[in-house]
Image (tube, rainbow, N blue to C red):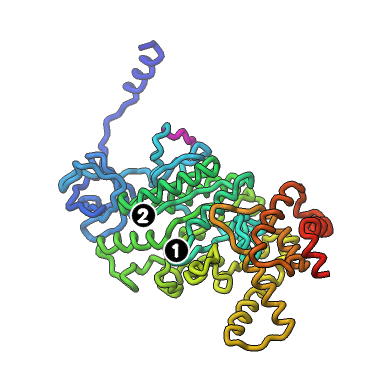
Amino acid sequence: MNNELLQRREDWLRSYRPQLRIREQGRVVSVGDGIAWVSGLPTAAMDDVLDFADGSRAQVFDLTGELVGAILLRETRDLTAGTAVSLCEKKLGIPVGDDLLGRVIDPLGDPLDGGAALECSDWRRLEMPSPAITQRDFVHRPLYTGSKVLDTMIPIGRGQRQLLIGDEGLGRSSLALDTVINQRDQQVYCVYVLIGQKRSAVVTTIELLRDYGALDFSTVVVAEASSLPGLQHLAPFAGCSIAEYWMRRGLHTLVVYDDLSTHAKTYRELSLLLRRPPGREAYPGDIFSVHARLLERATCLNAEQGGGSMTALPVVETKQGEIAAYIPTNLISITDGQIYLDRELFSSGFRPAIDIGKSVSRIGGRAQHPAIKREAGRMKLDYLQFLELEMFTRFGARLEAGMEKSIRRGRVLREILKQERLAPLSIEFQLAWMIAFNDDLLDGVELQQVQDLMAGLRGRVEASGLQLDDPRERWVALAQDWLPSTAGAQK
């Protein structure tokens, strides 16, 4: 022990003054199902963190006259009634920073991938107020998903909250994964939150992100089905805080909540265990505010705040296609639009099975590139009219020549819009096929030829190096060069 250290110890002893120190210490009354009831903590407040003598940890979730109800975040086998409990002065938070890229963590920031311990220099609370209205900007930059349907007819802007809704097994998660994969080289950091899913589904998602090189710019937050309900409840808030950290640094982020139906069920389970009064479908009355509090944090910041953005893609499940159920309607009213996946379309082979009529993006059009917006123009409306006309033809009605042409073009467009999962497309290719379609270069082709023509056109676009800002004439020339026979046929 050197002299400096001895001197510091001597100074500390000289200045030490004994004084009365008051500290609350409670006792566990009962524990079970991820919930602990604690007595003897009269100053405990909502969201305070509790440390247990056995090493367990919990968060205050409910207060009564005598007891404190807490959700367990870490539970040891030694936790029993009578265990001593004390209040932790620190609020619940998570380490944040670039060290999280490529990592798989739990909602408390503990690594789950077997890698080294995190070395993040910053820390951020899980519960934060959403940005003030004066800190926000209009959504003005597009977030490309790589999907033909979404990037053209239901565009998403950076900072938007777009709901993915549909029955189980229709491709909601695949669409979210496509969007994450497509952010490669787009300078967008991604956070994928898996809530209450089976371990096999978690492993599959992580492996897909790794195989497609998307894990390098992503963080995966996992609270699988076997984890404590408290962790499942906090998982989306942890993912939001991570993305929010990057947004506050002027970066663009994308966060996927997969899915909020399970999150709502977990919250209902915790609330019923804590004896809160149930409301509609036994959900507590504040379930709306929980999701609104989460999704309101996604936004596009103005230049004074760094200009960063956080785009949110919450996923929600419907039963039998019932879009008017309690949780789906809540989320529809909170978000800026929804992408609805339909089982009949899925069964008919139209994939991604997006129901264009029921899907909407309320603000994404403002963020579209002018060239894409010009070509997409009336495409959605024309396609919906085609669907109505096609249904009309099922009754054997005689059609005019113009109507027959509209139906023929609509069928070609429907064939173009089909797309395999995990195969996002560049926005330059999407501009090329829209120009080819709008200039009637595809009118003469057979439906069986469409996918082969699209594959060829895609390769031609990638080799050309054309950009969205290039003159339309160059794009037309490229399309005519690749599709000379059909162009000649229609002229």
Query: Which amino acid does the dot numbered 2 rest on?
Result: Gly
157 and 128: which is toward the camera? 157
Comparing 471 with 22, the one in front is 471
Q: Pick the residue in front: 203 or 464.
A: 464
**Residue 470, magenta (yes or no):** no
Mark 2 and mark 1 lie on one chain; the one further toward the N terminus is 2
Label number found at residue 316: 1
Task: State the image coordinates of residue 361 (x, y, percent, origin top left).
Answer: 59, 67
Q: Quadrant of residue 160?
A: bottom right
Amino acid type indicated by mark 1: Val
Q: Is the residue 414 above or below the residue 392 in the image?
A: above
Q: Which residue sits at x=34%, y=62%?
A: 265
Read off the magenta span.
Answer: 117-121
Q: Are marks 2 and 1 in contact (CB under 8 Å)?
A: no
Give the left or right position of residue 329, taking residue 390 as reference.
Answer: left
The residue wearing badge 2 is 196
By secondary structure, the bulk of the magenta-drawn segment is best described as loop
Work out how far the residue at label 2 is from the one at label 1, CA to CA, in angstroms. 13 Å
Q: Residue at x 33, y 47 (%)?
A: 49
As drawn, 150 above or below 242: below
Residue 221 percent location from the top left of the image: 43, 47
Q: Residue at x 70, y 77 (%)?
A: 406
Quadrant occupied by the C terminus = bottom right
**On residue 83, which mark appears?**
none
Q: Residues within 10 Å of mark 1 (few under 14, many from 20)?
A: many
What is the x, y in percent for residue 256?
49, 54
Q: Residue at x 26, y 45 (%)?
A: 75
Question: Which one is nearer the viewer's eye here, 277 or 112?
Answer: 112
